[in-house]
């Protein structure tokens, strides 16, 4: 499969090493990709990133997958695009409002897959997360730097 990506923080060399074509124009991703998969934090810059205009750029045979945050996709625009056949389908693991209301319009569509922001919570994933958390506690108690530190500024270097 040919992988194209947009990420302003990835070095071109890293993309090339992984056989990824890195584009500097986000709209080009929406125009060319058969599947657009979103993996971005919700920030003021990414809120509404996927809007009516970007959905209109997509191929009628394309799919949108949102694994990032609900506010990244304009759900009203997505509903219209799916309902009118502008794109083939979508899969969402996140919603603007979580949990979504029981009468959310996306629930009525056949060309969308929806999960409750727990798609990654497989048995194996939960075991790995628990093991990693426990290892972090052991590391701290034995004077080691934990592998995954969210707030490194609180660690005092010795």
Image (cartoon, rainbow, N blue to C red):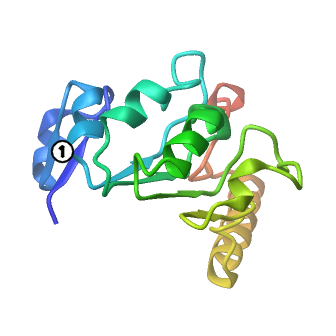
Q: Is residue 158 visible?
A: no
Residue 41, position in %: x, y? 56, 34
Spot the residue most to the top.
44
Q: Quadrant of the N terminus?
A: bottom left
Q: Which residue reaches farthest right?
A: 102
Query: Going 66% across and 40% down the picture, which residue do you hit?
Result: 70
Seen from the viewer's position, the closer of residues 72 and 142 is 72
Q: Is residue 71 above or below residue 117?
A: above
Considering only vertical position in the picture, is 74 above or below 148? above
- State whether residue 6 appears in this view: yes
Splitting the image into 4 quarters, where does residue 13 fall? Answer: top left
Q: How many marks?
A: 1
Tell me if mark 1 has few (under 14), some (14-19) or many (20+) residues whose alpha carbon lies within 10 angstroms of its own: some
What residue do we see at 82% from left, 46% from top? 98
145 to 41, vertically: above or below: below
Is disc 1 placed on a helix, strand or loop?
Answer: helix
Q: Is residue 113 left or right of residue 155?
A: left
Label 1: which residue? 15
Write the residue at 12% across / 55% down: 19
Q: Of all residues shown, which one is farthest toward the front?
A: 84
Residue 11: percent from the left, percent from the top? 21, 33
Is 97 placed left or right of 64 in the picture?
Answer: right
User: Could you tell me residue 155's position as x and y percent?
Assistant: 68, 32
- Work out whether 153 lies above or below 96: above
In this rendered view, identify the residue nearer to me: 129 or 65.
65
Dividing the picture into quarters, in which one does residue 120 lie? bottom right
Instruction: Return the residue nearer the eye: 41 or 17.
Output: 41
């Amino acid at each position: 499969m040919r992988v194209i990506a947009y990420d302003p923080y990835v070095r071109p060399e890293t993309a090339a090493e992984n056989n990824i074509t890195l584009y500097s124009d986000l709209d080009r991703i929406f125009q060319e990709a058969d599947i657009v998969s979103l993996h971005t934090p919700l920030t003021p810059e990414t809120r509404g990133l996927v809007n009516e205009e970007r959905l209109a750029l997509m191929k009628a045979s394309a799919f949108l997958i949102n694994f990032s945050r609900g506010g990244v996709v304009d759900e009203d625009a997505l509903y219209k695009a799916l309902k009118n056949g502008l794109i083939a389908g979508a899969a969402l693991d996140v919603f603007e409002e979580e949990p979504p209301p029981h009468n959310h319009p996306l629930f009525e569509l056949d060309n969308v897959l929806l999960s409750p922001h727990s798609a990654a919570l497989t048995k194996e994933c939960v075991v790995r997360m628990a093991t990693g958390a426990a290892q972090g506690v052991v590391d701290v108690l034995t004077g080691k730097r934990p592998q995954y530190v969210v707030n490194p500024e609180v660690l005092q270097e010795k």
